[in-house]
Image (cartoon, helix red, strand yellow):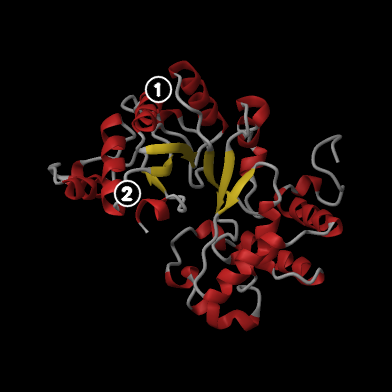
Amino acid sequence: GGPELRKKIILASKVAGYSKGRGYLVEKRRETLGTEMGDASSFATHLSKVQIFEAVDASLKRLQTTYLDLYQLHWPERYTPVFGELSYKRASERADAVTIEEQVAAIGELVKSGKVRYWGLSNENAFGVTKFVHACEKLGVPLPVSIQNDFAFVDRRFEQDGTAEACAPHNVGANGIGLLAYGALAGGTLSGKYADAAGTAQVETSRHAKFPDFQPRYHANSTLELSAEFAKVAKKYGLKPAQLALAWAAAKEYMGSVIIAATTMQQLKENVAAFDVSIPEECATELEKLYLNYERPYFANVGRMGRNNP
């Protein structure tokens, strides 16, 4: 127990980016630390040095530990299209956004103090990664080791919008910035339970049934359609859809780790077993063709993505 047991645990936490509707997070931190904050309803979360320090100290106190192995900036401080927003709107830019250099400097102090061992980004894009890397190089702060982004067979933005390139070892050195993929099962949709009549009981207790307005992107018609076809491919090769989805994500060269979750012990066992699955080349090829039919209809049935590359 004690310090020796702590060494065997990789403990991670995050700090919220800008939000004018989440003042309660700051309130909870300060309640934990025994400090006052005023009216939480009029308070915004920011990735300022003060709030980052408060968030770390509150987490350490709640977790009853002296350090965090990984600390992540949960979403960007600056305005940028996230969580499904389709386009960048200049009118939404904010003059009060905390600079990336201030955020990096704060992380640097936490690393130097020993409260944080490694740090990462989350819900970031290629532009953001590049700016953070440049700030680290300028200030002499260790580079982020991870980026926790939404990634699944039905959502491959990370590898298509330049973020995978920005995180590659060729551009940032060492082992690069590893992806910690969340949503690899698209909120359970890629498990095939919504396309399988035998999964009716599971569907009734699923998050999409209980919270239909939560993460609707995982349960949109196009996602359901693609997931149903995905399940057919899995069955063809004798695999469970959830295991194929997790194995597919884990096989990516830029993957640091795939985040999993489960409602039952059986689901957990199946999810863990997925990382021992080796996807046959024929199956991988079939999945790429399936994806092109939905995601890039103008390349459907031509057998390739782009003009010349197979």
Q: Amino acid at mark 2?
A: Thr
Using residue 14 as the reference point, say whether residue 48 is left or right of it: left
Q: Residue at x 48, y 58 (%)?
A: 215
Question: Above or below — where is 106 with respect to 242?
Answer: above
> What crowding class fits label 1: few (fewer than 14 Cα within 10 Å), some (14-19), or many (20 or more)?
some
Of marks 1 and 2, which one's residue comes earlier in the chain?
2
Residue 220, image x, y percentages: 57, 61
Q: Residue at x 45, y 24 (%)?
A: 141
Q: CA distance from mark 1 to mark 2?
A: 28 Å
Q: Amino acid at mark 1?
A: Glu
Q: How many marks?
A: 2
Using residue 294 as the reference point, say whether residue 304 is left or right of it: right
Q: Is residue 74 visible?
A: no
Residue 156, image x, y percentages: 65, 47
Residue lying furthest top:
138
| Residue placed under numbered mark 1 in the picture | 101
Mark 2 residue element: loop
Q: Is residue 105 visible?
A: yes
Residue 111, image x, y percentages: 39, 32
Residue 85 vs residue 203, the one in the foreground: 203
Residue 10 vs residue 199, the one in the foreground: 10
- Which quadrant of the figure contains the N terminus? bottom left
| Numbered badge on residue 78 | none
Using residue 83 as the reference point, say whether residue 6 is left or right of it: left
Question: Above or below — where is 247 with respect to 242?
Answer: above
Mark 1 or mark 2, whichever is nearer to me: 2
Residue 204 vs residue 86, the one in the foreground: 204
Q: Residue at x 81, y 70 (%)?
A: 236
| Residue placed under numbered mark 2 in the picture | 65
Q: Residue at x 35, y 24 (%)?
A: 102
